[in-house]
Amino acid sequence: MGVTNFEKLGTVAVITMQSPPVNGLGQTLRAALLKALDKALVSRGVKAIVLIGSGSGFSAGADIREFNSPKMLAPPSLHTLIAAFEASPKPVIAAVHGACMGGGLELALGCHYRMAKPDAQIALPEVKLGLLPGAGGTQRLPRVLGLEAAVNMIASGNSIPAEKLAGTPLFDEIATGDLRESAIALAERVIKEKRPPVRVRDLTVRHPNAAGFLMFARNTVASVAGPYPAPGKCVEAVKAAVELPFDEGIATERRLFIELMMTPESKALRHVFFGERATARIPDVPESTPTRPIRSAAVIGAGTMGGGITMNFINAGIPVTLLEMKQEALDRGLATIRGNYGGAVKKGRMTEADVEARMRLITPVLDYAAIAQADIVVEAVFEDMAVKQKVFEELDAVMKGGAILATNTSTLDVNRIAAFTKRPGDVVGTHFFSPANVMRLLEVVRGAQTAPDVLATVMKLGKAMKKIAVVAGVCDGFIGNRMLEQMIRQTQFLLDEGALPKQVDAAMEKFGFAMGPFRVGDLAGNDISWAVRKRRYVEKPMVVYSRIADRLCEQGRFGQKTGAGWYDYKPGDRTARPSAAVEQMIIDYSKEIGVKRRAISDEEIVDRIVFALVNEGAKILEEGIALRASDIDIVYLNGYGFPAFRGGPMLYADTVGLDVVVRRMMQFARNRHGDPSMWKPARSLARLAAAGKTFS
Ligand code: NAD
């Protein structure tokens, strides 16, 4: 089957795009469409042309499989194709259903008449990748939709059902019956009535006060665009559609598009777009790997994490048997789940009936025999190896053959946990992030013996739960927490050397984190990392830590939950107020350990914290704990609040230049207090920097 189909039905030629899954306008389809158009133009007897998509939609735009490959630029370009359709002396009718987005919509705008199914999804989503529509969309859409609606669509990138655009020149007709039949009928009417090709380029943008509206749009967009330049450039491009002749407008659009392509923000957004799709690819577990059916689940422990994990299952329609040690703990867990749904009801996102239906999917139990038939069991009990051992021995004894045994541990050795069973191939880590029902990230921890089909099943399950699942190998902290440890050590060395929590937080927030590390500590509970540190002091006595955070915890300052942490809090108020007592404690501690405090620049704060992440990330890559640098970025963007417009720590390092990163690390290594040994560049980092290469 070719990527297009050509039919001649009397005086009408029907060109059908048939390039699954979404009729992406890759080079092959572009070339085939041009050929089909030429055939229609030379076909004697053909007086009008219908362009339609088969399958799920008209066309979802560029073929993402071609991105960053030479094929993307290979002729014919989308511009050439659209110009050819627009120039056709025989009228062309675009018949639109399903997704009609990006280049797909731009192609439809090059046609002379358009008809759509009411539920067709119309969008120019390029802004979401930090770009603007680059094939005439910013020039043609305002000509048919009017200035305001076009600016809204282009600067937001949001999709709109075609029926909401009925009555505008974008759609001549909305098809209620069969789209193809209706489009052919329209074509026949156009022929019969001798209607000419209507070229959008010849229309003018109408607005009673275009200049005033554009100024308003520019200001509005600037106030919501944050660090992203694309929405503002979208307005600028549309302005050209109002003020310049069509061809000059197209040239302006082209120039702005190329400018945006080069911005770090667009590079970051595109990196994330492709990075999120790459996480599912596991080199030795091909897509064809069979998966185990997951029709039922069990969760052990109805605490903070067990409750959220249970919600993930039931939200995906998978019934859960929830096991606890005591009835009270079970009741408490169920009440919390119900309470969480209550929030969604208040916001109008769910009805009471929805909540009841979800709650009915949970069977609370106190007895292991009741979970034996579950297809997967996720353990979320206390973070203590002895407790995990007891639970996994129990699971090994009761669970049916083929059941997947997953642990939600955040720091313990998944291989040791697997060894508590006689079926280590069935054991895997599913590291959810808190709150588990909200956070998108899921680290899937692959044990030394985890079976490929278990891994494939859990990755697929993550998708069903609408999570971004990233594979991690077994090590202390997996990808995210292992890197976090290095970041936290730096934040505390910075306090010892002269910074205060408010300065560190402000610098990191200016860099783009929603919350600085000390505010995060107060939110998450400083006691949790204290417990982990105490274990590390024993397990890894060689690692140098500042003891300042221990001092804080010794005073019972666990964070928001105790009304005091790195900051002070008033009852019922989460505002972090700098604490004179804590600041004095920090200053006293520096004196006690003999460190002369100095002024530390915000630049040093950011570089030390971010490059600590980068160096550990490079080690994680070398050791094969992460499959690719972009997986590390996806973890940091979705689990740790790394600013999206910077694309994650590894892409940020690439952007800064790895040679610059290494030089900066050498400078930090001269500081005797900040653990000089941690600034020895990871081998992969040193190698890439020396070769002038990047992680990506
Ligand atoms: P939690 O203390 O809130 O809940 C643990 C629950 O397990 C309690 O309700 C307890 O009664 C129950 N429990 C303990 N032993 C049990 C047993 N033998 N059988 C049945 N139930 C038992 O703890 P949490 O924060 O939900 O953490 C659970 C796990 O998730 C830990 O391994 C933790 O490291 C991990 N984790 C926690 C977070 C987080 O932010 N809290 C994030 C990621 C992973």
Image (spheres, rainbow, N blue to C red):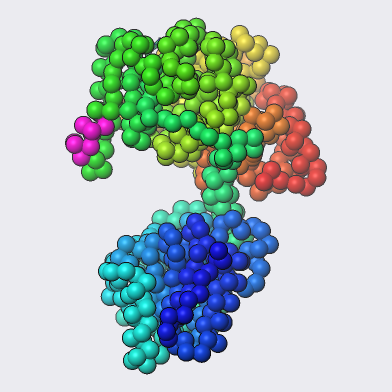
Q: Name the one closer to the observer, 620 or 520.
A: 620
Location of residue 581 (image quadrant) = top left
Q: Name the one closer to the observer, 164 or 597.
A: 164
Above or below, 65 relative to 135: above
Question: Residue 357 in magenta?
Answer: yes
**Residue at figure coordinates x 40%, y 90% from the top left:** 196
Question: Residue 20 in magenta?
Answer: no
Q: Give coordinates of residue 218: x percent, y percent.
A: 42, 66
Q: Give coordinates of residue 184: x percent, y percent.
A: 37, 78
Residue 109 visible within the image = no
Q: Name the one closer to the observer, 64 or 262.
A: 64
Q: How many marks?
A: 0
Main secondary structure along the magenta-highlighted residues: helix
Above or below, 581 relative to 316: above
Extreme residue toward the right, this view: 690
The image quadrant where one finds ligand 1 is top left
Q: Decide if residue 457 is on the left or right side of residue 451.
A: left
Q: Name the one closer to the observer, 637 or 314.
A: 314
Above or below, 375 relative to 45: above
Quarter containing the N terminus: bottom right
Q: Decide if residue 197 is on the left or right side of residue 5.
A: left
Q: Decide if residue 538 is on the left or right side of residue 695.
A: left
Which residues lie in the magenta part? 351-359
Q: Give coordinates of residue 76: x percent, y percent.
A: 62, 73
